[in-house]
Image (cartoon, coloured by chain):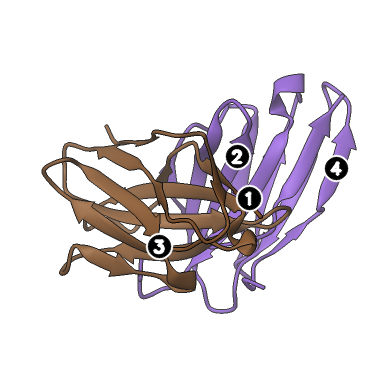
Chain colours: A brown, B purple
Amino acid sequence: AQSVTQLDSQVPVFEEAPVELRCNYSSSVSVYLFWYVQYPNQGLQLLLKYLSGSTLVKGINGFEAEFNKSQTSFHLRKPSVHISDTAEYFCASQPRGSQGNLIFGKGTKLSVKP
Amino acid sequence: DSGVTQTPKHLITATGQRVTLRCSPRSGDLSVYWYQQSLDQGLQFLIQYYNGEERAKGNILERFSAQQFPDLHSELNLSSLELGDSALYFCASSETGWTGELFFGEGSRLTVL
């Protein structure tokens, strides 16, 4: 069975500081990995995805994530956050080769303070 | 704007009642997914349809059912509602040529009193 664990439910950080949101996955098969963002009162939108190739993936709004197979992790990073990055971030996985649903973690609320 | 439209945005009803949530996917997308988001369970996959056929089933209760119509819109029917069914229900769609991205609607917030 697949599962995704987001290690922090809330991450407060000051504006212009770096941030890392942690995600670990568990699966008996290879997976694709995703990060989605949910702004208040909105649906989720894709930040970035790892399908294959380079383990360092760059996404929108200056975010990047690194796939680490040995540690089964896919942590999300940004070197300098803005107030507008305040949102909930979801890590998700999908069995490689399937075209079905994503399994989501419980989310991390990022709160950026001035 | 993701291009996925969900109605209604908000719905308040009583226990024991039945409601229908509607979703119009992005133009051309054949797959529709339903997710339930609650504070305690997070985002839970309910069911997926592809071009009118059920493709995958997740943690969907027997009181819940869904279908996808020939025009590709989908409906999620929730019956014998309980307090615990209060949640945000999201619909998402994906491209026919799979890219790994789901496009989410803004959700339907259901409150059961």
Nearest to viewer (mark 3 / mark 4): 3
Whole-Å distance between the Cαs marked 3 and 4?
40 Å
Report which residue position mark 2 lands on. B36
Amino acid residing under circle 2? Gln
Examine the rendering and report whether any part of residue B51 can be seen.
no
Q: CA distance from mark 3 to mark 1?
A: 31 Å
Instruction: Give me the disc on residue B11.
Output: 4
Q: Residue at x 44, y 70 (%)?
A: A62
Front disc: 3 or 1 = 3
**Quadrant of the rendering where the N terminus of chain A is positioned:** top left
Residue assigned mark 1: B90
What secondary structure is found at the residue carrying circle 1?
Answer: strand
Residue drawn at x 20%, y 42% is A72
Furthest residue toward bottom: B28
**Labels 2 and 3 within one chain:** no
Left or right: B32, with B65 as reference point: left
Q: Amino acid at mark 3?
A: Pro
Q: Position of residue A93 (x, y in %)?
A: 33, 48
Q: Given the image, what chain letter belongs to the residue carrying mark 1? A: B
| Dot 4 or dot 1, earlier in sequence | 4
